[in-house]
Every structure is written in structure tokens, then in C-alpha cells.
Amino acid sequence: MSDDAAAGDGGEPESETVTDEEVLDALFATIEDRKQRLPEGSYTASLFTHEKGENAVLEKIGEEATEAILAAKDDDTEELTAEAADLVYHLLVLFAQKDLDVADLQAELRDRF
Ligand SMILES: N=c1c2ncn([C@@H]3O[C@H](COP(=O)(O)OP(=O)(O)OP(=O)(O)O)[C@@H](O)[C@H]3O)c2ncn1[C@@H]1O[C@H](COP(=O)(O)O)[C@@H](O)[C@H]1O
């Protein structure tokens, strides 16, 4: 978590108070904050302003998915977990770009139960 996020100055939750159960919502709130404020030095903000447009995040999703597959093939569970986290983060940035919400994903998954 960056200093910006840890300071909680953009209205997003503070990292030390976020539980495992809350982390997806907290991460998405941080992504929405970066989308609105576009703070300098924010990687997330750079994805919203990238010269490649939405291709920047789409390319990252492809890369992270490939890296997760390669980690799985190597039976490297630590690397697989890290790459899966990168993938989920970039998917949530894409959701924010498309004006979707993490609640849309949760509802879709719940409907399949
Ligand atoms: N969860 C993430 C997260 N996961 C991955 N990444 C970034 O995604 C990029 C992944 O790129 P790669 O794996 O290809 O690694 P790399 O070597 O940096 O590659 P390049 O970016 O140079 O292509 C890295 O720059 C990571 O820092 C993330 N960046 C931010 N977050 C969350 O977003 C919050 C806000 O971050 P900022 O927007 O930077 O303030 C953070 O506090 C985190 O909670």
C-alpha cells in the first residue's frame, strides 16, 4: 500500500484496518479513488491516463494471466498466488474503467451458487 493510500487521504480505507473479508471492497474503493483524483505517482492512476488507452490494462491482464499459468506449470504456489493477486487487481482496474463495480462480480458469482 502506498503512502497515499496508507494516509487514507482520498477517502479509501486505511490498510491496517482492512480484514481479509473486506480487502476486495477496500481495494476497489482505492482504485475508484485513484480514478477520480489521478494522484501523481499512482500506478493505478497511470493505467487510467495511459497513452495506450484501455489496451494498457488489457495487456497487463494478458501478461499476468500468462505468468499465473507458468507459475502453476512450475508448481510454484507462492508465485501463483502473487500472480493471481496481480491479475485480480488489474481485472478490478478494468471493472472501474468500464464503470462496473466489485459488487457486480460478487453478484455474478453468487448467482451461480
Ligand atoms: N494491488 C495492487 C497491485 N498489484 C500489482 N500492482 C502493480 O502492477 C504492476 C505489475 O507489473 P509487473 O508484474 O509486470 O511488474 P513490473 O516489473 O513492475 O512490470 P512493469 O509495470 O514495468 O511492466 C506493478 O507495477 C505493481 O506494482 C499493483 N499496484 C497497486 N495495487 C493496489 O493499489 C493500491 C494503490 O496503488 P497506487 O495506485 O500505486 O497508489 C495499492 O496500495 C495496492 O493496494
Image: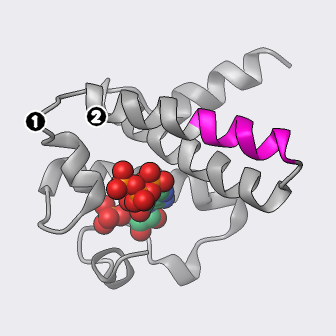
Q: Is residue 101 magenta?
A: no
**Left or right: 51 in relation to 23:** left
Disc 2, SS: helix
Say which of 97 and 83 sits in front.
83
Predominant SS along the magenta part: helix
- Distance from disc 2 to disc 1, alpha carbons, whole Å, reads 8 Å
**Left or right: 38 in relation to 69:** left
Q: Is residue 71 magenta?
A: yes
**Left or right: 22 in relation to 98:** right
Residue 46, image x, y percentages: 20, 51
Query: In the drawing, what numbered circle is on residue 56?
Result: 2
Structure colour scheme:
one colour
Q: Tell me if mark 2 has few (under 14), some (14-19) or many (20+) residues whose alpha carbon lies within 10 angstroms of its own.
A: some
Residue type for callout 1: Glu
Query: In the drawing, what numbered circle is on residue 51?
Result: 1
Relative to 77, does residue 113 appear above or below in the rendering?
Answer: above
**Rendered-image quadrant of the C terminus:** top right
Q: Is residue 86 visible?
A: yes
Q: Is residue 27 visible?
A: no
Disc 1, SS: loop
Residue 58, image x, y percentages: 38, 27
| Region of the chain picked out in magenta, as a range | 65-74
